[in-house]
Image (tube, rainbow, N blue to C red):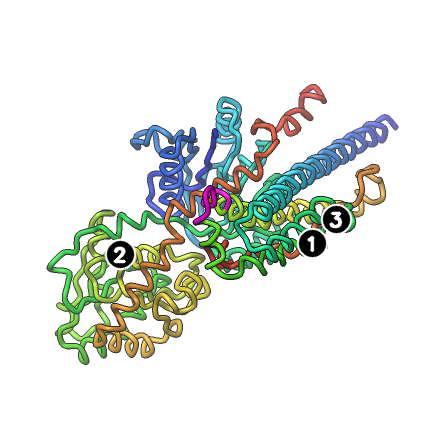
Amino acid sequence: MTQTLIWTVVALIVIGVYLSWTAGRLDRLHSRIDAARAALDAQLLRRASVTQELATSGVLDPAASIVLYEAAHAARQAEEDQREVAESELSQALRAVFGEPEQMELVREAPGGEEAAGELAQAVRRVPMARRFHNDAVRAARALRRHRTVRWLRLAGHAPFPLAFEMDDEPPVALADRPA
Amino acid sequence: MRIGIVCPYSWDVPGGVQFHIRDLAEHLIRLGHEVSVLAPADDETPLPPYVVSAGRAVPVPYNGSVARLNFGFLSAARVRRWLHDNAFDVVHIHEPTSPSLGLLTCWAAQGPIVATFHTSNPRSRAMIAAYPILQPALEKISARIAVSEYARRTLVEHLGGDAVVIPNGVDVDFFARAEPKKEWQGETLGFIGRIDEPRKGLPVLMKALPRILTERPGARLLVAGRGDEEEAVASLPREMRSRVEFLGMVSDEDKARLLRSVDVYVAPNTGGESFGIILVEAMSAGAPVLAADLDAFAQVLDQGGAGELFANEDADALADAAIRLLGDEERREELSTRGSAHVRRFDWSTVGADVLAVYETVTDGAAAVDTDERAGGLRARLGL
């Protein structure tokens, strides 16, 4: 009798430790997603700001300026569910305007242009990076959350099911020093 | 930034990963960052000031060869102490799937962790069995770097998720400025690599050599690398053996001079390469490159734009291409010019900036790296 009781207690402790450890893993993954998402937001915002700065600087022709300004403005103001589309459109606008290396040369020649061009190049290359890290974290969390134990015991609590951030983040050729 | 780098392989034994870490650490230190490298090393080995020894590596059979790895209770304790004492902004682990310091660090640390995957091993049974054990540790990595598109593909296939591609770096100017050596010039083919390692492809080159030497009576082959020299030339006709020169192990300076001197650098590797740093070094030195068409090599050579490719393990194709190149100075000039321009993207100035961009992306707003108290905390919570 006592022996059965002892074994039951031992089994319960082992299960408890395992569950606590799994919950810890989930918690860590969720905070990793939060950090990655914050980093992605920061990079997207940086990209939109530099674009807007360039669009209002008067270095570019009026048509290109309007296209860029519109896209950057829309990306910054987009609602959460429209965000991916708006950011993709900003990528397309950037590719359309800075598709030719000559356009980039023009920006570099303007006063302060070297810096602006450097910032834009940095921003368009860091967005894909941050997005990959974010989606990688999302994938890891989703894999764990699909686990039977996690689903049945609701170890994830009320945390929303993580979603990947899907967008077109291909940088303009003239700004990517390196082919992907 | 305070950066901790973890090297999984013994610092005493030279190897690609170790050289990469050394160059990366020195580049970051030159930029004014604080860098500490944790690596397995013997007590007697003289270490550079930025390297901290994690104790002696133990030789164990792993993955088909004997690897010198660090594991066990003592190593884990050293990793924890190193993490705790340094309070890094970011920890950069190399080769996190090898059962050594990298994996231990993943297990013991929390905070921004960056990991570089160097090799692209085909999926092994051990890896599949180890997957549930690896996964909780690998989950902690906030950013993964693959050294080539090929390495990234295998990584995605085996472990899921994604990675950014940042190639290995080379100090391009070190090779570009090396002084050519007179006695290594004049219709010379170059080969650098372990002689007795069939994957490096010297046997393929030896099979192609008789025809090359017959067609080009002035040609010679220079071989730099460790291994049994007599065994290597055993397949050659006796009168041709004198036209193969063995230089043994060469210093970094001599390697650069050799690459500057040869007319064609040949890379007949048959597989197991995930990057091909030697091709980048050869291009840096302006040597026209002739390489096997492995995925990784084709990528480094811009799909044949910056160097010639031949069908892997095809000695006849190698011979044809080598004969053609040796007789066509214009083509060699062209390859040399294109290679020198192409190779700039592998210079440490570019690669280092990319690595730093990754560090900045993961540390933006994150707390510093510390030991993961959950692993030990659970024990503490239960009063053990």
Q: Is residue B272 above or below residue B366?
A: below
> Could you say where residue B177 lies in the image, as x and y percent from the top left?
22, 50
Q: Which chain carries label 1?
A: A
Circle 2 Cα neighbour tier, 10 Å, few/some/many (<14 / 14–19 / ≥20): many
Question: Considering the numbered disc 1 on the image, is that residue within a helix, a strand or a loop?
Answer: loop
Give the numbered dot on residue B285. 2
Over which residues does the magenta segment extend?
A109-116
**For residue B318: magenta?**
no
Q: In this view, does A113 lie to the left or right of B281?
A: right
Q: Which residue has dot 3 on it? A: A163
What's the amino acid at mark 2? Ala
Q: Are marks 3 and 1 on the same chain?
A: yes
> Could you say where residue B194 lies in the image, as x and y percent from the top left?
30, 56
Q: In this view, does B59 lie to the left or right of B171?
A: right
**For residue A112: magenta?**
yes
What secondary structure characterizes most of the magenta part?
helix
Quadrant in which residue B381 is drawn: top right
Q: Quadrant of the C terminus of chain B?
A: top right
Question: Considering the numbered disc 2 on the image, is that residue within a helix, a strand or a loop?
Answer: loop
> Which residue is depicted at the point 53% across and 61% down?
A99
Q: Which residue has dot 1 on it? A: A166
Residue pushed farthest top? B383
Q: Mark 2 to mark 3: distance in Å?
A: 47 Å
- How many numbered discs sit on the rendered protein? 3
What's the amino acid at mark 3? Leu
Q: In this view, does B279 lie above or below A41?
A: below
